[in-house]
């Protein structure tokens, strides 16, 4: 499994021989200027929720990847399927098998609406279960006891992508506790540094994880991490 960071909560996950893009927000990201959104090639777009900093580039990426499929909660599927895009609806607790492996949609504690105010369903996270590893993508969320259900219901995690920027989501200290709840020691941080109120101290964030016996990876934008 290889994971490339495109800034904020946007990652390209190469798993099970396919390319899964999460929460595309590149063209409006002030610190991701060097990423060309038009160069992104993917087979799936996983959308955790409908806030603009998670969907801004969905339609651009889909126009460049017409065979790709959007996966999201029912209301996100409904929004994009009515626009003519290929979609697969899910909801919390469910698994579905795709050609790269399985996906489970899991809980996230946050809010969700489209930029025009339309209801976006509820926010969610995903667990990717592929032959080359299992990955938890938390989405925007607070620390929640529901995370303890993941090791009870999913294969052992190879890694997890957790938000650490505080203000809108959990901070690094809470995310370090989350790493214990999900029983995963290899964490990739997201949802930090993008805007002024998400700026974090990288060393302090990494130290919070070391204190809990875990490792926080903060790849540079454009950098890839190979796992498994
Ligand atoms: Ni959000
Ligand atoms: Mn967000």
Image: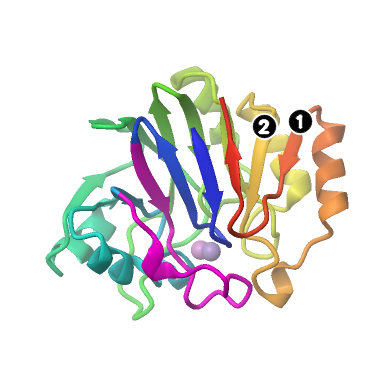
Region of the chain picked out in magenta, as a range: 18-42
Can I make out residue 119 in this image? no
Dots 2 and 1: beta carbons under 8 Å? yes
Residue drawn at point x = 64 percent, y = 43 percent: 188
Question: Going 73% across and 36% down the picture, which residue do you hit?
Answer: 177
- 33 drawn magenta: yes
Q: Kindly tell me whether mark 1's CB lies below 8 Å from ligand 2.
A: no
What element does badge 2 sit on?
strand
Q: Residue at x 58, y 62 (%)?
A: 8
Q: Which residue is mark 2?
A: 186
39, 174: nearer the viewer = 39
Residue that appears at 61% across and 52% down: 223
Identify the main secondary structure in magenta.
loop
**Image: 106 above or below 79:** above
Q: Position of residue 174 (x, y in %)?
A: 73, 45
Element under disc 1: loop
Direction from residue 197 to residue 71 in the image, left or right: left
* Residue 118 percent across, percent down from the top left: 30, 74
Residue 214 image label:
1
Q: CA distance from mark 2 to mark 1?
A: 6 Å
């Amino acid at each position: 499994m290889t994971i490339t960071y495109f800034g904020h909560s946007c990652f390209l996950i190469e798993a099970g021989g396919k390319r899964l893009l999460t929460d595309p927000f590149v063209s409006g990201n002030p610190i991701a200027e060097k990423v060309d959104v038009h160069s992104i090639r993917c087979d799936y777009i996983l959308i955790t929720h409908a806030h603009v900093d998670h969907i801004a580039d969905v339609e651009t990426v889909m126009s460049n990847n017409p065979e790709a499929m959007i996966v999201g909660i029912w209301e996100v599927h409904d929004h994009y399927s009515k626009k003519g895009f290929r979609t697969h609806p899910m909801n919390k607790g469910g698994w579905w098998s795709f050609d790269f492996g399985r996906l489970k949609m899991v809980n996230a504690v946050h809010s969700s609406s489209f930029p025009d105010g339309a209801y976006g369903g509820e926010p969610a996270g995903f667990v990717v279960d592929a032959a080359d590893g299992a990955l938890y993508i938390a989405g925007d969320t607070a620390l929640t006891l529901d995370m303890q259900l993941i090791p009870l219901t999913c294969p052992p995690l190879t890694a997890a992508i957790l938000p650490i920027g505080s203000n809108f989501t959990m901070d690094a200290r809470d995310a370090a506790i989350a790493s214990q709840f999900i029983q995963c020691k290899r964490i990739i941080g997201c949802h930090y540094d993008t805007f002024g109120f998400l700026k974090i101290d990288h060393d302090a964030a990494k130290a919070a994880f070391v204190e809990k016996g875990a490792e926080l990876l903060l790849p540079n934008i454009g950098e890839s991490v190979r796992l498994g």
